[in-house]
Image: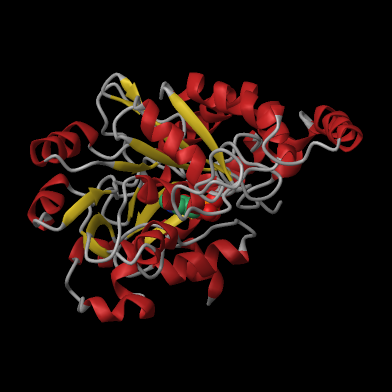
Amino acid sequence: MPVPMLDLVAQNVVVKQKVVDGLSGLIDRCSFVLGENVKGLETELADYSGAKYAVGMSSGTDALLVALMALNISHGDEVILPSFTFFATGGVVARMGAKPVFVDIDPVTFNAAPKSIEAAITPRTKAIMPVHLFGQLADMPKIMEIANSKGIPVIEDACQSLGARGWGKSAGQFGQLTGCSFYPTKNLGAFGDAGATLVRDDEALAQKTRRLRVHGMEPVYVHHEVGMNGRLDEFQALVLRAKLPFLEGWHEGRRKNARWYHQRLQSISRDDLQLPLEVVPDGRHIYNQFTVRVKRGRRDEFQAHLKARGIGNSVFYPISLHQQPCFEYLGYKKGSLPETELASEEVLSLPVYPEMTEAQLEEAARAILDFFAGDSRLQNL
Ligand SMILES: Cc1ncc(COP(=O)(O)O)c(C=O)c1O
């Protein structure tokens, strides 16, 4: 039985009729951009996240970009972020003409290590962008303490982690601004590109973010800043509103599958395979990805084995940002960020989506156990 990395068909079934009916209404009303669904979604996202304001955006990338614009980040400024993240986190910094300053990660959580952030601060540092990678919060109390002591604003990249919790708070309640993505593979996914920028509590910053989303325009044809077209479609907002009531259940389904992997794979030595650990006090990892570390240089072999057994898997991310060709000008060398580089060589994400059946979980676990028991090498001879 093949086990895909993600199967959205089962999830879509529960919202399909509502979405189809809603779309019909949108067509009849000719309401396509920034209408009542976007407004409604913004209220619901603020409630859900605990941030005071939410601004619907066209993607997670634009949600991060507009956050940098709202903070006036520009040429000559430095922004600190982990190198081990999706490209967009660094791309938006460079797009503003600022310098991305990449820092190393904690090898257990894959998130930026507060000590590395502190060491990277210079008089030119204008923002810190921690990423809550794979669904688990970065060490936000320490990061906020460092940032606040220097008066540096923080933008959380919660593109994979809306709903992640820790230290009595949720993603979006730590930094001044937070970027969220609703790309279809996220725990809350649209039917296309969509995102949102959360604003923790500053009304003026929220107003500016909303204005920047429409070319800095307020009122119509008066432009205060050079903004962007970052508007969210009504259709995507409608889909997200239909899905939002299910989100808590989906997070819990992923968590249940993660626990199941832990139980089923406990006989494998941690010297061979490291399963993801939850280390955040009072925390909730939402497992946008269930990411293991394959030790002893065997990731490629393990991937080939999983492929042969029909088990979906992905490497997030094989090349970290400081090693990307477009960032060569920054001068990082191999070995500059050792934990990041090792993670790039070892990580592998396994299927964890909430609609997985017990039989699929068992199929995946069996394939994994067979590999580490050595069966696979015998079978492949
Ligand atoms: C950590 C991270 N940051 C930023 C983004 C960008 O979001 P989007 O693809 O919606 O533009 C993503 C999405 O893949 C992400 O995972």
Instruction: Establish if 17 lies above or below 178.
Output: above
Residue 16 image-quadrant placement: top right
Horizontally, residue 59 falls left or right of residue 82, namely: right
Image point 46% across, 55% down: which residue? 226
Image point 46% across, 62% down: which residue? 315
Q: What x and y, as percent, mark residue 22?
A: 83, 30
Horizontally, residue 73 falls left or right of residue 375, namely: left
Residue nearer the viewer, 268 or 338: 338
Q: What is the basis of the colouring in this image?
A: secondary structure
Residue nearer the viewer, 3 or 87: 87
Residue nearer the viewer, 219 or 81: 219
Q: What is the number of callouts on the image?
A: 0
Farthest-out residue, front: 222
Image point 66% across, 39% down: which residue? 359
Q: Is residue 160 visible?
A: yes
Q: What x and y, as percent, mark residue 141?
A: 19, 31
Q: What x and y, as percent, mark residue 43?
A: 56, 22
Q: What x and y, as percent, mark residue 60?
A: 51, 48
Image point 42% across, 63% down: which residue? 87
Q: Is residue 366 visible?
A: no
Residue 100 image-quadrant placement: bottom left
Horizontally, residue 247 falls left or right of residue 51, namely: right
